[in-house]
Image (tube, helix red, strand yellow):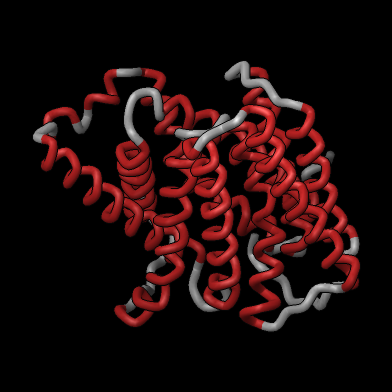
Amino acid sequence: MSLSTPISRAYAAAVAYAVIIGFSFIFVKFALRSTDPVGLLAHRFTVSFAAANLLALMGWGKFRMSGPGFIKLLPIAVFYPSLFFVFQAFGLSRLPSSEAGIIQAAIPIMTMVLAALLIKEHATGWQKLCILMSVGGVSFIVVMSGQQTGTGTAKLTGYILILLSAFSSAVYNVMARKLTQTYRVAEMTYIMMGIGFVVFNAISLSQHAVRGTLADYFEPFADMRFVISILYLGLLSSLLTSYLTNYALSHIQASQMSVFINLSVLVTISAGILVLRETLAWHHFAGAVLILGGVIGVNVRGNRYKKRHFRT
């Protein structure tokens, strides 16, 4: 594909975004071998915020953030990155990355439902049918996994946490719809990385203080695999993907972009099988077909949807 036109570059950015997000689950699993979910998040956003500050000093973006502006962005930062990554990290500590990736394919569907409920953007009858198909795929995976393996509360909790992570992302998508028209992407990204840095480091340091293990805070960095993972998650999966998404959305519709979100699911599944040697049962593939089929069906008929779209 030639990259000589803005549209082709937008699709290239969307594909790059999907690949980065798809592999991020693998790096989360690697990092969790050296630290707990809270420690992972603290180090991840330390790297992200440090990089954001460095870029700002180098002239990256002009910040016009005021006190009222910060307050307006605070609610969306609660859902993303705070709740989104908390639920994701704890969910991945209980589930294979491939299964978690399949469940998070429901993000665009949840976004569409919340958009209809909160800001009255309604789907067509065909899109509602596709929504039900994707939700059915998620439910099928959860039910069949429990029946086949007799999983107890640990794995069930993992499914619930990943679903809550997906829901947090969907809430952020809807809330950020209007804010992206007012604030620059650099400003929003900087504030969200900063809030993630403060929140997760405060929690992690408090836990270490209570346990009397403050000296162990930087211990995970002795593992080179952790260092590589945290750099990937902090620099690529947190910072870079924000800009790839923004560039793509400046040239293609958000409904089209959501297809690429689910391309990341296929990347996650493939990476989990090839890199982590995870295995999937037939019901995982069947559920994935239902989820992805529903999402693609929604977006193929996107031209019949009202031309008000959301950042996904």
In the depicted structure, whether residue 72 falls above or below residue 141: below
Q: Residue furthest left?
A: 212
Counting every numbered tag in the picture gives 0
Does residue 286 appear in the picture of this structure? yes
In front of the other: 148 or 158: 148
In front of the other: 96 or 269: 96
In front of the other: 101 or 10: 101
In the depicted structure, whether residue 152 falls above or below residue 270: below
Q: Position of residue 270 (x, y in %)?
A: 70, 26
Q: Is residue 118 left or right of residue 70?
A: right
In the depicted structure, whether residue 113 falls above or below residue 155: below
**Residue drawn at point x = 77 percent, y = 40 percent:** 288
Q: Is residue 161 left or right of residue 119?
A: left
Q: Position of residue 218 (x, y in %)?
A: 22, 29
Q: Position of residue 51 (x, y in %)?
A: 37, 45
**Residue drawn at point x = 77 percent, y = 52 percent:** 136
Question: Residue 275's image quarter?
Answer: top right
Q: Quadrant of the N terminus?
A: top right
Q: Position of residue 5 (x, y in %)?
A: 80, 52
Question: Residue 109's image quarter?
Answer: bottom right
Q: Quadrant of the C terminus?
A: bottom right
In front of the other: 268 or 241: 268
**Residue drawn at point x = 55 percent, y = 66 percent:** 171
Does residue 261 appear in the picture of this structure? no
Q: Is residue 199 left or right of residue 263?
A: left
**Residue drawn at point x = 90 percent, y = 66 percent:** 126
